[in-house]
Amino acid sequence: MCQIIEKEDDHGGDFPSSLPGFQTYPSGRDGILRTATHWINGKRHDDNIGDFWRVHDKLYDLTNFVQRHPGGAYWLEVTRGTDVTEAFESHHLTDNAEMILKKYFVREIEEPRNSPYTFKSDGFYKVLKRRVAKELPTIPYQGRTVKWHNVLLWSFFASFFLSGLYSSTLMIVLAGAILALLTNCSHNFYHKSNNWRMYAWDLSGLSSAEWRVSHAVSHHGFANTIYDYELSSFEPIFDFKPKGKNKVNRFVVPIFSWFLFLGLNHKTLIERMVVIATGKQKLRPENLLPFVELALLMFLSDDGWRLWNILMCSSSFWFGFVGLIAAHHHPDIFHEGDAPRYSLDWGLCQLDAVRDRWDVNSSDFLIATMYGEHTLHHLFPTIDHDKLPFLNHILVDTAKEFGIKEIEANRKYDFLKLWIGMYAQLIRNTPRTLKGQ
């Protein structure tokens, strides 16, 4: 049985971790200002490997490869000095990347990885990945995600300009709801190599570049653990951990969560302006898109400032509502504080931290806009949502082969069950003592 353990971090204190093997408590996790920049800088400090990149127990100097990286230079630029094992494994399906790595090998490293996850060749994830890599070329690309992205993009532009021309509150609220769906759909694209569609994410006041770190690297790599930025970024208001919560967290926040959803985009914009102003982060051109929207609304309407704030609030509300219910927060799902399964195979731990909604997975539009097929997406984030439904049989068969009996049940949740479950998780204050096998 896996039990909660205490480890000493390099800051001189003890910290509890339900995943045996985390070597340090994340630097800056409990700071007042929590941004993607703070998270990656903290990880760089904790991994402590200088200017190299770590994959498993080897160091590589990819400096001369950064600009030639097929996925885009940004991924390597932002992760320099960190252990990228989880991102490397989940973002590269074939052995091609491993062959390229050999050219940039520096040396073996004896210090244990900060992360406890394993990627054994005969383990669940590596076996599943090989099977998916073999099947993927046979799956035709139908372009459904692109189709819905186009529909939402043009619908947003139309409702946005109409709201400005007629100073319509109702129309700008609608534009905000469409923008939230467009933002969710754009999530499919920032996981990939650089492309113009991912910048639709930035129209909401969020940042595709920042979310490549906070979501693709942090959340996908360490779902629902102490190293998951998306778990810590809502604290101390939303505390999804199953222990140590006060009565405000448990009983007041759930009641007022609807109002808190309204301010997520404004909060993000303010935090970004602070880190840019203090020189901790560079201004990126796409960061200006929300302010271009503001300028356009003020040009079109004397009420532009009010309309822009309503747009941000409407978009923020629906984005927060859908995002927090998407797949990760329910008492049945592993959260930091719960005892994990015996095996720390990365893929198996992902299964424990994710649930699928059958009602969302029944529609290609909902898959694209409400984080459908989320288990497969977490396991293989670079695969287009368009192809994920065709890989279900491989996931189910491989899970059964490894004795994961709950795989079918984990894929039969629905939107309502996870909505209620999110509030139940906020209230829950008793960790599970055992998970899985």
Image (cartoon, grey):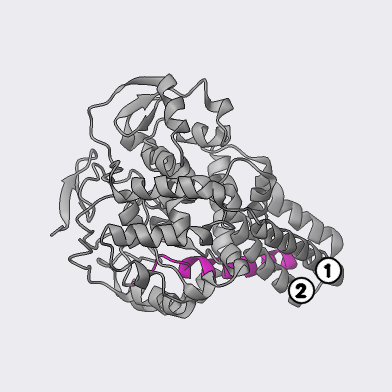
Which image quadrant is residue 419 in? bottom left
Residue 375 percent location from the top left of the image:
43, 60
Q: What stretch of residues is rendered in magenta? A: 305-330
Can the viewer see residue 35 in this picture? no
Residue 60 percent location from the top left of the image:
39, 24
- Image position of 344 with respect to 405: above or below: above
Q: Is residue 211 left or right of residue 295?
A: left
Residue 296 lies in the magenta stretch: no
**Label of residue 180 in the image:** none
Observer-nearest residue: 214 or 132? 132
Q: Residue at x 67, y 53 (%)?
A: 200
Q: Residue at x 44, y 68 (%)?
A: 356
Mark 2 Cα within 10 Å, few/some/many (few <14, many 20+)? many
Observer-nearest residue: 73 or 394? 394
Mark 1 Cα within 10 Å, few/some/many (few <14, many 20+)? some
Q: Is residue 31 left or right of residue 186?
A: left
Residue 48 percent location from the top left of the image:
32, 31
Observer-nearest residue: 397 or 228? 397
Secondary-structure class at tag 2: helix
Q: Quadrant of the N terminus?
A: bottom left
Q: CA distance from mark 1 to mark 2?
A: 7 Å
**Label of residue 171 in the image:** 2
Q: Residue at x 36, y 65 (%)?
A: 239
Of pointers 1 and 2, the one earlier in the residue sequence: 1
**Label of residue 162 in the image:** 1
Examine the residues drawn in magenta and state their main secondary structure. helix
Secondary-structure class at tag 1: helix
Residue type (three-letter) at the residue carrying disc 1: Leu
Residue type (three-letter) at the residue carrying disc 2: Met
Observer-nearest residue: 400 or 60? 400
- Find out whether the residues at labels 1 and 2 contact each other: C-beta distance under 8 Å: yes
